[in-house]
Amino acid sequence: MPYLPTQLLRIYREFKAIAPQDHYGIVRFYEREEAAIGMLDIEAYFDCMLTYAGALYETGDYGRYGVMADQLLAYMLEHRIAHWGGEDLFAPILLRKAHALMLLQEYPQAGHVLRELIKINPDDRAARELYFQVLSARRPAWMPKVRAVAGLFILCAALIAAVEIFLIQPFHNALADYTRVGFIGLFSTGLLLAGISGALHHWRCKLELRRFVGFARGRKRG
């Protein structure tokens, strides 16, 4: 339906009057008045889109935030909007998109976005830290197997402890020393395996992050 300029102005003012922390209110209003908001001028429409996208992110609607982030970036390129309120927008939008993808466990896509951010600015600490989190979350295929073996050792240690308490000590106390040695050995081996696998994965992620940041810096220097 057509809207008069005065109606569009009223809708925009009502939208901007919503408290910034009322994220659900922002989402509801935008979705109710989306047709009218789409008819605003370039700056007002972008302002509403940006506010709506931020509200989606804050309410944990990460799937729709990712879609909206793509729309924002496309709109910015189309209308040559690089800064808003004196601040660069590309990096924060992409960083939030990567974080949303990570929370949705879409690790390859999140990693791709973060690598592009690091290529643009290798000194972007937030992008580097988030990239490390993504790398850490993408556990290699061998890690669950090692953790399963470690869990088996710990389970066997627990069984030996139960046998010692209920059978060995009451009826065969002379064997208690052997069962204790078995318990300590199995339990320690399980903990050691779990610890080593975690430390190795952590080290590999740090190494990959350092390698990629170095690559990005070398590329920037040309």
Image (tube, helix red, strand yellow):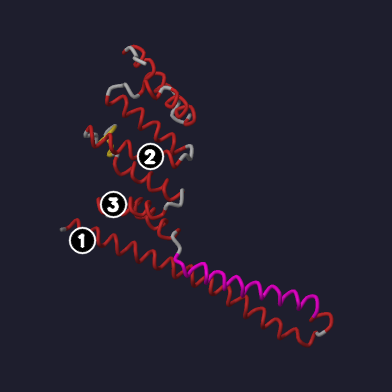
In the picture provided, is 163 more to the left or to the right than 10?
A: right
Seen as rendered, the residue at the extreme right is: 171
The range drawn in magenta is 140-167
The residue identified by callout 1 is 218
Q: Nearer the viewer, residue 6 or 19?
A: 6
Residue 10 horizontal/vertical position (percent): 38, 15
In the picture provided, is 121 more to the left or to the right than 126?
A: left
The residue identified by callout 2 is 67
Q: Is residue 47 above or below residue 8?
A: below
Residue 77 appears in which quarter of the rendering? top left
Q: Is residue 73 above or below residue 121?
A: above
- Cα distance in 3D space between marks 1 and 3: 14 Å
The residue identified by callout 3 is 116
Residue 25 horizontal/vertical position (percent): 48, 27
- Cα distance in 3D space between marks 2 and 1: 32 Å
Q: Nearer the viewer, residue 136 or 125?
A: 136
